[in-house]
Every structure is written in structure tokens, then in C-alpha cells.
Image: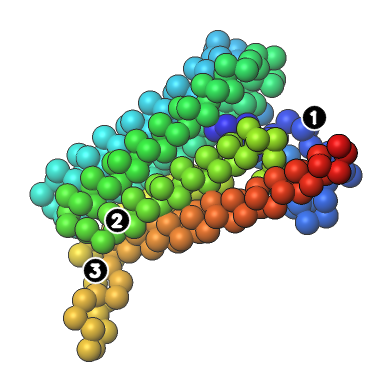
Amino acid sequence: METSEKLELGTSDFEVKQAPKEKAWKVFLQQGIYKIVNPFVRLLIRLGFTPNAVTTTGFILNIGVAVIFVVGGESENRHDMAYVGWAGFLIMMAGLFDMLDGQVARMGNMGSTFGALFDSVLDRYSEMVMFLGICYYLIAHHYFLSSLVAFVAMIGSMMVSYTRARAEGLGVDCKGGFFQRPERVVLIALAGMFCGLGSALLGGDFKLMVPGIPFPVFETISIFTIPLAILAVFTNVTAFTRLREAKEAIELKERREAGLR
């Protein structure tokens, strides 16, 4: 997970007394996560993991996510959502490694400029590979509309990250909106796991019909696809929000520079 979007877990990165009040809750949450994952980070360092190795591990796990979705797509049983559940679990595990690479770099004093670039590039590949698997699964089982929603969610996810990175390259900081990478990972992972659980409890062929409506208003796969729809909307809203913020910041910067001449 790139530096601009990952949880900054080190105590040196956050000082509660300096944080805005509206962000204080996030500071305390991040410090709480830091205390939980810190022993695991130390273990990774003792085992000889470098930040790039942790990043690569997360990427390999995301390839595994895509494989699970593809295998599930090839399954003849359209209502077997266990594949979605296991894929969701693996997405969460991949996200954990994705979050920890920066902490390994800090605690192991192994940070590097190339490492930051490598991290950002593999993050994008990881997310696209994951969405590739999701789209394949949905198309294979004839959830065509949901596959389009997943594709739009992928576009939004890419643009959330790209808009911020491009703005920062122009010397402008824009952090507005929802669903940065940590939130996206958690939402998709939980959606997948709850879909698998829902399939076990309700059955993979559960459908809720409403009189007068020729199609089900809810079915088991909806546990997975509704969060994807939320992601599709709000990631793109966030991308445009950041674009607007960047425009305003660039114009302000240009006016200030013009005033100094």
C-alpha cells in the first residue's frame, strides 16, 4: 500500500496533540492497530522479510484471490458461494501484508525511494488482478450487470489513487473523499466473507421476490455485489472530489506565485 494511502502506524508519524480534532479518532485507531500488529512486524523482520518481500507476498496472495474467483467461475454450481467467501478471506490476508510493508520499512530501518515506487506499482497490479478475478466470476455465472458494476468500481479505485498521486506530483495535496485503499480492501473482503457465510446459512440460491417485480430484489450474491455498487459510486465521487480540490489548490498556488512576481 503506497505511503500516501496506507495507515501510518508508527508513533513517530502521529502525535495526538498535533492532530486536528476531527481526525483524533483516526489517530487513536491507528495507534491501536499499531500495538496489535507490532509483534507480527517484528517477527517478519526477524524472519528476514524486507519491505519489498512483504509487498510481493501481498501481490502473490492477490493472484491467489483471482485464481479462487476463476476456479469458482468455472464451477458448474452457480450457487456455491464458498469460493467468494474464501476469496474474501484471502483479500483480507493480502491487505494485511499490504499494510505492513511500510511498518517493516520503518521498524527495520529499510525504507528506500525505490521501495515506495515498487509498493505503489504492485498495489495497482494487486487491485487490478483482484478485480479481474471478480469480473470473471460474475460474468461466468451470468451476473452481467454486476460485472459491469465491478468494472466501474475498479475504474474508480484506480482513479482515487491516480488523482492523488498526480496532484502530489504537481505539488498539490488532495486527500478528500471516501474509500482509500485500506477502506476498499476491508469492504470487499468483508463482503466476500459475509457472502460465503450467507450462502451457508441462507443457501446460494436464496431469492427475495416482490409481487409485481419480475426479478429478485435481493439474492445471496447481493451480499457481495451491493458493496461493490457502493464502491463503484463513492470511489468515482472521491476521484472527482479530489480533482476539484486539486484544481482549487493549483489555482490558489498560481495566484500566490503571480503575486510574488
Residue 187 appears anywhere in the view:
no
Residue lying farthest to the bottom in this orientation: 212
Against 71, is 118 above or below?
above
> What is the spatial separation of the Cα atoms under label 2 and label 3, in whole angstroms?
22 Å
* Residue 229 horizontal/vertical position (percent): 40, 61
Q: Which residue is mark 3?
A: 206
Which is nearer the N-term, disc 2 or disc 3?
A: 2
Q: Are marks 2 and 3 in contact (CB under 8 Å)?
A: no
The amino acid type found where label 1 is placed reads Ser
- Which residue type does callout 2 highlight? Leu
Query: What element does badge 2 sit on?
Result: helix
Q: Earlier in the sequence, mark 3 or mark 1?
A: 1
The amino acid marked with disc number 3 is Phe
Point 52% across, 29% down: residue: 120
Question: In this view of the protein, which residue sits in the foreground, 82 or 130?
Answer: 130
Residue 148 image label = 2
Marks 3 and 1, how far apart in space? 50 Å
Q: Kindly state the secondary structure of the residue where label 3 is placed.
A: loop
Label placed on residue 160: none
Callout 2 environment at 10 Å: few (<14), some (14 to 19), or many (20+)?
some
Q: Name the residue nearer the viewer: 121 or 165.
A: 165
**Above/below status of 219 relative to 248:** below
Residue appearing at x 63%, y 15% in the figure: 112
Q: How packed is label 1: few (under 14 Cα within 10 Å), some, or many (20 or more)?
A: few
Q: Secondary structure at mark 1?
A: helix
Callout in the foreground (2, 1): 2
Q: Which mark is residue 12?
A: 1
